[in-house]
Image (cartoon, rainbow, N blue to C red):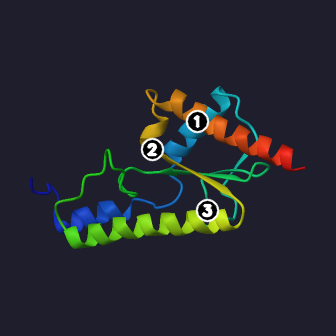
């Protein structure tokens, strides 16, 4: 299917998409933290990759990856135009994600990557159980090491 916009119009639309701080996704996650009583998080600490949320005490960094920008295996659909550009862009994003996770791990952080589809009404309960368990496991490990 051909694009309904001209090349210039599509370029203008795509230029308006910001790469940082997907407000709706982050607000949804904050709501889930509050609904599930998960406390101790902070936003956007100055760490490699700028995690969306950080639990400093447990040294857990949480990233919420957009299905399009990070190449979700379930939902990503490669655009039909500019295939070379988009293939390189998404591959570069995945490479950067792995590099950031490795750097955080080397610094003693545990990295949790969630897809934006993990925090929908349908999936959020399971996601929050998983996230809470991982954070509690890190707390237990820290207490045992003291």
Residue 89 sits in which quadrant? bottom left
Above or below residue 3? Residue 8 is: below
Task: Say which label, 1 or 3, has the lower sequence index.
Answer: 3
Residue 138, how many percent across, how many down? 73, 45
Q: Residue at label 3? A: 50
| Residue lying farthest to the right in this orientation | 146
- Tell me the distance, in whole angstroms, between the alpha carbons under discs 1 and 3: 22 Å
Residue 113, how many percent across, how many down? 53, 50
Residue 67, how many percent across, how many down? 38, 50
| Residue lying farthest to the left in this orientation | 1
Q: Residue at label 2? A: 116
Q: Which residue: 69% across, 41% down?
A: 135
Neighbourhood count class around disc 3 (C-alpha, 10 Å): few under 14, some 14–19, many 20 upward: some
Secondary element at image label 2: helix
Neighbourhood count class around disc 1 (C-alpha, 10 Å): few under 14, some 14–19, many 20 upward: few
* Left/right of residue 136 with respect to residue 144 in the rendered view: left
Q: Are marks 1 and 3 in contact (CB under 8 Å)?
A: no
Mark closer to the observer (1, 2):
1
Secondary element at image label 1: helix
Q: Which residue: 50% across, 43% down?
A: 24
* Left/right of residue 66 with respect to residue 139 in the rendered view: left
Mark closer to the observer (1, 3):
1
Task: Say which label, 2 or 3, has the lower sequence index.
Answer: 3
Q: Which residue: 45% across, 33% down?
A: 120
User: Which dot marks residue 130?
Assistant: 1
Task: Say which label, 1 or 2, has the lower sequence index.
Answer: 2
- Tell me the distance, in whole angstroms, between the alpha carbons under discs 1 and 2: 15 Å
Q: Which residue: 58% across, 33% down?
A: 128
User: Which dot marks residue 73?
Assistant: none
Q: Are marks 1 and 2 in contact (CB under 8 Å)?
A: no
């Amino acid at each position: 299917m051909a694009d309904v916009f001209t090349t210039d119009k599509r370029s203008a639309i795509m230029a308006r998409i910001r790469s940082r701080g997907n407000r709706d996704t982050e607000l949804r996650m904050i709501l889930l933290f509050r609904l599930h009583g998960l406390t101790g998080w902070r936003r956007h600490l100055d760490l490699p990759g700028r995690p969306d949320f950080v639990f400093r005490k447990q040294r857990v960094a949480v990233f919420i990856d957009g299905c399009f920008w990070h190449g979700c295996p379930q939902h990503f659909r490669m655009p039909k135009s500019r295939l070379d550009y988009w293939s390189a862009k998404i591959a570069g994003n995945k490479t950067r994600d792995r590099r950031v996770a490795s750097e955080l791990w080397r610094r003693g952080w545990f990295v949790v990557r969630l897809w934006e589809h993990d925090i929908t009404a349908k999936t959020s309960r399971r996601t929050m159980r998983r996230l809470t368990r991982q954070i509690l496991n890190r707390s237990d490990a820290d207490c045992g090491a003291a």
